[in-house]
Image (spheres, grey):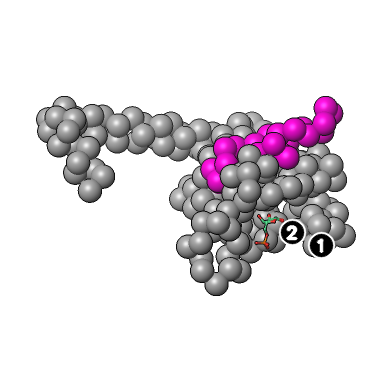
Amino acid sequence: MLVQIIYQIFHNRIVNYSLVFPNIMGYSKKPLVGIIMGSSSDSRIMQGASEILDEYKIKHEDQIVSAHRTPARLAEYAKHAEKMGFKIIIAGAGGAAHLPGMIASHTTIPVIGVPILVYNDKHPKKSDTTKFSAFGGLDSLLSITEMPSGSPVVAVGINKAGNAGIYAMKMLANEFPDLKKKLKQHKSNQHNSVMKESDELKKQGLSKFAKKKFK
Ligand code: RP5
């Protein structure tokens, strides 16, 4: 690395500092992940992706792009994403959920789809569960995963936007070694939290533990 830097300085060839200092200039300086969703109603779920990226200081740009309400904007967004240099697009959509597949058809940037269980936030009674999608999110999941051969989109589980954030981080970790360290830390935090709960369960006994946990 040092030799490469000296070589580039000597030859006055440093045009893109992020190539030379990937850890410093990389994921925390400019957005490398584009988060899009089909509707403002998806933001309730999609915030799960931004939370994890924010936690690890990975910059992202967030927008609403609807494949059926703003079809021309969808094509424009794909160009924008390429111009911005996004490495990954996280696309959340509910129902017919064609947004992830359509975006993937307009760009070579890998797309992670988040199938969303549609909940109509425009309904006056927001707790009205009858407004859930007729197919419980399976509609969105299948729309995303069943892309025809040759046009792949990967998907996380229904409403699992946080997993899309972690997966994006894993992809970026191939390029930014300190993200790999943070992922290892994330895994070890998970391990520790399971151990803590297991110790509690063992100490209290199952019945007492479960009663306390779900009271
Ligand atoms: C999809 O339709 C969106 O992704 C959203 O999940 C669903 C419902 O949209 P709204 O009626 O809430 O705007 O395009």
Give the residue at x 61% y 69%.
122
Q: From the image, tell me which residue sits under label 2.
A: 65
User: Dot 1, how many residues are within 10 Å of its Cα: few (below 14), some (14-19), or many (20+)?
Assistant: few
Q: Amino acid at mark 2?
A: Val
Q: Quadrant of ligand 1?
A: bottom right
Q: Residues at badges 1 and 2 in contact (C-beta under 8 Å)?
A: yes
Q: Position of residue 165 (x, y in %)?
A: 56, 44
Left or right? Give the position of 156 relative to 194. right
Q: Which secondary structure, mark 2?
A: loop
Q: Is residue 186 left or right of residue 19?
A: left
| Disc assigned to residue 70 | 1
Which callout, 1 or 2, points at the residue further toward the start of the chain?
Answer: 2
**Which residue type does callout 1 highlight?**
Thr
Residue 28: where, in percent of width, then height?
A: 56, 51
Q: Principal SS element in the magenta part?
A: loop
Q: From this viewpoint, is residue 159 visible?
A: yes
Q: Considering the numbered disc 1 on the image, is that residue within a helix, a strand or a loop?
A: loop
At a point 85% along the width and 58% down the height, the residue shown is: 71
Residue 211 percent coordinates (x, y): 19, 41
Vertical relation: 95 (above or below) 202:
below
In the image, which disc is placed on residue 37? Answer: none
Residue furthest to the left = 203
Q: Nearer the viewer, residue 127 or 154?
A: 127
Count neighbours of disc 2 (C-alpha within 10 A) and say few if under 14, some if 14 to 19, many if 20 or more. many
Q: CA distance from mark 1 to mark 2?
A: 7 Å
Q: Write the residue at 15% across / 37% down.
A: 208
Indicate the quadrant containing the N terminus: top left, top right, bottom left or bottom right: top right
List x then y, in percent, for residue 98: 77, 47
Q: Is residue 18 magenta?
A: no
Magenta-tinted stretch = 141-161
Note whether ligand 1 is within 8 Å of mark 1.
no
